[in-house]
Image: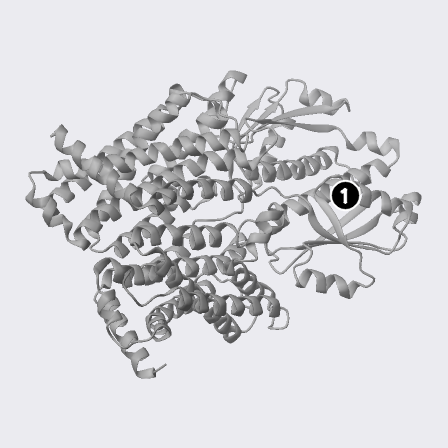
Amino acid sequence: MYERVKNLVIKEFIHAFRIKRTVIFLFITPLIQLLIFGYVATMDVNNISTVLYDLDKSFESRELVRRLESSGYFTITYTPRSAVEIRELIDRGKALCAIQINRDFGKDLKRGIPTEIQVIVDGTDSNTALIAMAYVNTIIAKYSKDMMGQRIKAMLSTIDFRTRVWYNPDLRSRNYMVPGVIALIIMLTCLILTSMSVVREREVGTMEQLMVTPITPIELMLGKTIPAGAIGFFDMSLVTFFGVFWFDVPIKGAILLLVLCTGVYLLSVLGIGLFISTISKTQQQALMATFFFFQPAILLSGFATPIETMPEIFQYITYLSPLRYFLIIVRGIFLKGVGISILWPQIAALFVLGIAILSLSALRFKKRLG
Amino acid sequence: MKLLRIKAIAKKEWIQIRRDPFSLAMAFLMPAILLFIYGYAITFDIDRISTIVYDQDKSSLSRELVAEFRESRYFRIISYVEQYGDIDPYLDGGRARVALVIPYDFSKNVRTGRNAQIEVLLDGGDSNTATIAQGYILAISERYGQRIKGSTITPLIDSRSRVWYNTELKSRNFIIPGIIAVIMAVIIAILTSLTIAKEWDRGTMEQLISTPVKKPELIIGKLIPYFLIGFIDTVLSILMSTLLFDVPLRGSISLLLVLSSIFLFGGLSFGILVSIVARTQLDASQIAMLSSFLPAFLLSGFIFSISNMPKPLQIITYFIPARYLVTILKGIFLKGSGLKLLIFETLLLTLFAVVVFAAANRKFHKRID
């Protein structure tokens, strides 16, 4: 059996490496994915393009503007002459935020009379809007406090929230995204590889040739999954390497544990790939089915949005996604440096899920072939 | 170019599609399911952040503070702990994201008018959630500070914030129009990217070559059935967004359909181009992934704002048609923009479609090498 599986694996590799372009894709695809994710997938809000309509032009208004700009969150890109222009700039999406300072702003402040500032935020992107609003209000509130008399100030600033950020103190979203990309890339590559390579044999007609050889279904299955698994491990190392050395993502935990958990994760992934190969007749179907599974699986895994913000029913569904567990594991290892003592529930769940999926698919695979 | 031959190719392709009900079902089910998940499950509104409390003070003041957190919909107190050491497992295991530590002398300090400190520990792993949580905490601290002082001191500067377009700041309104573009980009890429490669793989290309059908006829003929599927998907997505998810459609629906059609034509031609260049189906699927799905998802400005990206990537986004469709969809849905505001996007979408179609014609060789 060992001999036959070995030969099959060699055949698969020969097949994959015969066409140079396929090889390039297998290696380049994960890299490009990582690069784009690393650079793009950030929700950090900086340099919000801001319209400033300053009717006052006093020392006080300039000081406020200086504070807004030096915060790094806002960049004044337009200073229109009329209020109508504000509307147009925001309509066209050239600016996300507009600040209007009325006449007499400085005078009122000096006299201690309460005054107003108009802030307009484009709410299209609700998250950015929320963060932008929080920043503006904080900066204005701070300025307002600084302009108050000492006596009143003493009454106001009594409670001080000292926030300490753990694990990712600079709040770099890259540190959060890059480990997640590992889970994503392994899944996508392995699903496409396993499902399409089995279906290709069927579509092109070489499956019959394989069936007349003494290879058993289990051996065929191993022969198809082992190369995909090997490429999965390779992708994992590639992404980890580039994540750490290119993107400076810290890896605080044990790399050995990461390798081990990747193996456990591969059980489910390869199982799903085999399952897809049993339900599709053509490579196009396999590709469709892969995406049909893959997209909801990412969405309902906590990759982009936290699971606890989902409605309860969907939260239960996430328990069925191997990605969910693996994401907690990779992020735990990368960011928190935690070990088996904390991650064992996830590892156990992933293992059980993997064995279940793999054996179900294997049974189906065997039946379809037999 | 003969209409008859185009019709014949379109008919042949349609029969092939019909014979594969599995793929056809997926082509309609996928947008529906994705929209369903995006509409119901995925929200970028951060609320119910799991929080643990270590209240050393246990006074009425500290309980009020905790109540302030509990009553805001942003935080959900999941547990109380009694010592520092108990905090770690919660944060390490990811069961809580925020830990609130109220020190022994909190109420004493507040009463005597001294500076009272509250310690907040935040899981910064998910930097986005953490940033937003910080904003919420700030807001609560201001409110609470005013309340316990019973003070009526109005702040000197009152910042009047107004939100335009998506006034309730519902992320659903922002995601749904964008996701329609992504779904369309993905579906048409999968549908068409394999279509020519399949003919080569199976050897049916030789049969097509031996017929008098010309290159543009073959390409247009192959496009038509997929265009129809894509168009139905678009209409389906628009209907679902407005009827099921109450996303406001402020602009003109006919403009939306016309511009989406231009996008569909360009995207389908691109899929065919991929299929021509790739030859094998595995390669075609990889190219389609890299050139359609990823850019549409990441570089279109659908979730991640383009102005935040590094300059080289910003330039790349200009070559990604989904970028224009996302702007168009968001503009028409949320802002009610007309053609005048969207003219730049429309022109570039058209340019893309024409160029790609021409490239597909050029690259396609009707011969066996």
Q: Is residue B156 visible?
A: no
**Mark 1: which amino acid?**
Glu
Front-most of residues B293 and B89? B293
Q: Is residue A113 above or below residue B1?
A: above
Position of B126 with respect to A201 (left or right) is right
Residue A336 screen position, x and y as percent: 49, 25
Q: Residue at x 39, y 42 (%)?
A: A315
Question: Which chain contains the residue that carries disc 1?
Answer: A
Front-most of residues A58 and B341? B341
Count every numbered label the image shows and give the total: 1
Asked which colour scheme the image uses, the reply is one colour
Position of A23 with respect to A252 (left or right) is left
Residue B347 screen position, x and y as percent: 57, 70
Secondary structure, mark 1, is helix
Residue A263 screen position, x and y as percent: 31, 29
Front-most of residues A188 and A264? A188
Q: Residue at x 83, y 32 (%)?
A: A153
Q: Residue at x 50, y 49 (%)?
A: B298
Q: Residues within 10 Å of mark 1 (few under 14, many from 20)?
A: some
Please state, as top left, top right, bottom left or bottom right, where the N terminus of chain B lies in the image.
bottom left
Q: Is residue B67 above or below residue B14?
A: above
Residue B17 screen position, x and y as percent: 26, 67
Please give the residue where the numbered disc 1 appears in the rendered image.
A69
The furthest residue to the front: B369
Position of B152 with respect to A236 (left or right) is right
Q: Is residue B208 above or below residue B56?
A: below
Q: Quadrant of residue A212?
A: top left
Please state, as top left, top right, bottom left or bottom right, where the C terminus of chain B lies in the image.
bottom left
